[in-house]
Amino acid sequence: MYDLRSAARNAMIAHGFSPDFPDEVRDEIKVLRKPRFPGPASGSLSEMRQLLWSSIDNRTSRDLDQIEFAERSDDDGIRLLIAVADVDALVARGSATDGHAAGNTTSVYTGVAVFPMLPERLSEDLTSLNEGEDRLAIVIEMDVAPDGSTTRESVYRALVRNQAKLVYESVG
């Protein structure tokens, strides 16, 4: 009988991906702790937990790496914010985990197996933008004019909280 999981794993290797996490990566992940945010953000970190952030993904998704917020601006345009999980806040540059992620560059989803770029403890727990959890994020903010052009853009680090985990099938 043909083993589809083995075939998927072999295809990963044949295309230059590393389907398994080396021991060094597993060791690094074991010692990571969830950041705590007892007070308001300060310094170069923007406080944005009060906004109505939401994610939209598959029903079973646990690796929520992006949330969004939008509101109408005074000039009939839209202020759009997209927050991406700040994995870099927990993963040291040049570490084994950083090297593995840089080598694979993406998670690969096959019909029979998922080969994640990051260990599940990072992607589904410590940095996942889970509903109701305070997280560090990189925010891309832009003002979109009524004609669709962008009139202002900025990128910064922020403290965010996903207020609603939406599901594709339930949102129109």
Image (cartoon, rainbow, N blue to C red):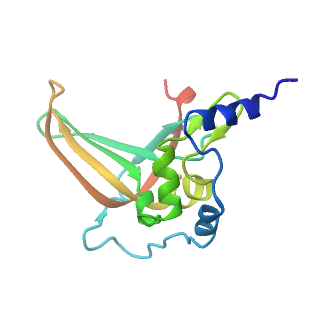
At x 33% / y 59%, what residue is drawn?
48
At x 29% / y 66%, what residue is drawn?
45
Give above or below for 46 relative to 150: below
Residue 148: x and y in percent read 18, 26
- Quarter of the image for residue 33 reads bottom right
Give above or below for 109 relative to 100: above
At x 49% / y 41%, what residue is drawn?
106
Residue 127: x and y in percent read 50, 58
Give above or below for 117 relative to 96: above
Residue 145: x and y in percent read 15, 31
Residue 158 lies left or right of residue 116; in this view the side is: left
Which image quarter holds the N terminus? top right
Give above or below for 57 relative to 162: above
Residue 163 appears in the figure: no
- Quarter of the image for residue 3 reads top right
Between 34 and 42, the one lying in front of the other is 34
Residue 99 lies left or right of residue 119; in this view the side is: left
Residue 162 appears in the figure: yes
Residue 149 lies left or right of residue 114; in this view the side is: left
